[in-house]
Amino acid sequence: MIEQPPRQQEVMAFVERFAAEMVEAGMPRMPARVFSALLASEDGALTSAELGERLQISPAAVSGAVRYLAQVGLLARERDPGSRRERYRLHEDQWFETFTRRDAVLVRWENALNSGIAAIGADTAAGRRLAQSAEFFAFLQKELHSMMERWQEHKAAR
């Protein structure tokens, strides 16, 4: 392992600790480590080589992790002008973007539940259970919109 200055050791300890929290919440381990490293980087962007060096992982591990993170919308790929190297960058307002995209998932789940209610029948035990689930997701959507508006107001007031 490459010897790191004390401050860098503290940063890497944070990266591993936060990645472990994300793994506990359901994210695969390597994408969680890559995301955490990007989050802790000065400008929120690193190349594959930089990620590999910081995390002591193979190029294949970086590739798989960034593919996953791009698919779930947690990072963007960009090229340095005049270079073939890709940089992986977090979105500017990462958490806002992530939770805003969750709204579309809630809409899809609510719609799927409503089609299930139509298929099963609203007057059955299963239909009532599906209806309660659909109502829950509708409630979450409404609250999420309200919460995101409050966040924008809070951020503007800072």
Image: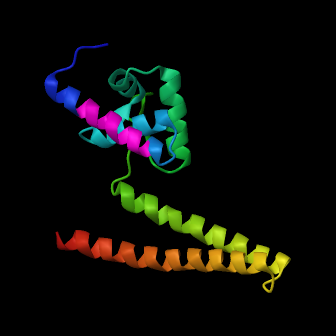
* Residue 12 visible from this viewpoint: yes
Report the residue at 77% width, 75% height from top.
126
Is residue 94 shown left or right of residue 139?
A: left
Q: In this view, does 3 lie above or below 51?
A: above
**Which range is magenta?**
11-22
Q: In which quarter of the image is residue 148?
A: bottom left
Q: Quadrant of residue 64?
A: top right
- Is 21 in the magenta? yes
Is residue 83 shown left or right of residue 70?
A: left
Report the residue at 28% width, 40% height from top.
40
Report the residue at 44% width, 58% height from top.
98
Report the residue at 39% width, 39% height from top.
19
Q: Looking at the image, which is closer to me, 122 or 142?
A: 122
* Residue 76 visible from this viewpoint: no
Q: Position of residue 111 (x, y in %)?
A: 69, 74
Q: Where is residue 110 in the image (x, y as percent from the top left)?
A: 65, 73
Quadrant for the N terminus in the image: top left
Magenta segment's dominant SS is helix
Total labels: the figure holds 0
Is residue 71 shown left or right of residue 32?
A: right
Q: Where is residue 3 in the image (x, y as percent from the top left)?
A: 23, 14
Q: Is residue 121 above or below residue 17?
A: below
- Is 89 in the magenta? no
